[in-house]
Image: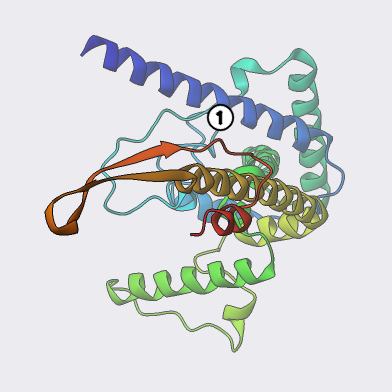
Amino acid sequence: MKDTILDTRTQEKALKDASEKELLEALNQALQCENCQIAVTKDIMTIDIDNGNYNVKQYPPFFQSNIRSDESISPLDTTAPSEDPTYWNNMSLSQRQRYYEVVEQNLNKVLDETKKIDPEVAVLFAHYQVDYHVRQHYLAGRGVLTLCRDNSDLQQLRKWQWKMSDIDSTCSSEPAKTEPAGARQWSWPSDQNLELTYQHVMWKRSSRARLKRVREVRARWAIIMEERRKQRELLLLKQGATLTVKLYCRGELWDIRTLRNIVSPVPTVPSVRVGRATRSMGL
């Protein structure tokens, strides 16, 4: 029993360490990123705070165990939420300095664009922009869109999410929201904070690398299938390459009876194909 508990704890620690490593990599990517054009607003920040997605009392604010929608967890699952990954304790000094540099840049931009803003709100919004960006890079490698190989998979996922949203709306006491015509072809349900929208943009950006990855996997799988075919043929060859010897006994009135069948293996040649081997043995 103790060994089982220790093994479980070891696995949980390994998973947590892997998640923290991926989160640290996402942080480094976001701090050095110059491609993302993420334009979140204070209204989006308010939505995330009101929904409990962005909790400023803990750090990092976005990565709390109460965010379970993007993990595609079954509603029947009763597993306790795991401990949230963090990167703050593992950040290098240069990363911390870069983090606050980006926060300061965002803060100056907010103050320049909005003169009548509460300084505390401005500071919070500056941090939110950086944390939002880090989360997008983190989900780019772990989000649900990583399951999609091409646009066909993406559209199937979008339709499935809208179906799940329709089921949730039938059980909700709130009036159903009406979407603009054709909105389900390009938008995502319950995406008030534009999280899936920006993930979709990053998913498109990595299309070339993803296509290369799919081709590499298909090539490896083709090699595996060819090896399995050869192994199967060799197995069938060994099973079928036997020589049956019958011993007869002549009794009264020319009564011939079979006493025994002896099955003797015949040496096989791996290069001989199954069809030729069976024809040579008269099978």
User: Which residue occupies 12% across, 53% down?
Assistant: 252
Direction front: furthest residue: 253
Instruction: State the residue at coordinates (28%, 16%).
Output: 5
Q: Write down the quadrant of residue 153 in the picture.
A: bottom right
Q: How many residues crowd around disc 1 within 10 Å: few (fewer than 14), some, or many (20 or more)?
A: some
Instruction: Provide residue 180's location: percent of width, then percent of height.
Output: 58, 85
Residue 195 seen by the camera: no
Tag 1 residue: 19
The kind of residue on which mark 1 rests is Ser
As displayed, is residue 194 above or below residue 139? below
Q: Position of residue 228 (x, y in %)?
A: 58, 46
Nearer to us in this view, 19 or 63: 19
100 vs 14, nearest the viewer: 14
Q: Nearer the viewer, residue 28 or 204?
A: 204
**In this orientation, which residue lies closer to the viewer: 256 or 71?**
256
Q: Secondary structure at mark 1?
A: helix
Apparent side of residue 207 relative to residue 161 in the rendered image (left or right): right
- Residue 174, relative to residue 195: is it above or below? below
Identity of the residue furthest to the left in this view = 252
Image spot of residue 156 (x, y percent):
55, 71
Q: Is residue 76 left or right of residue 267?
A: left
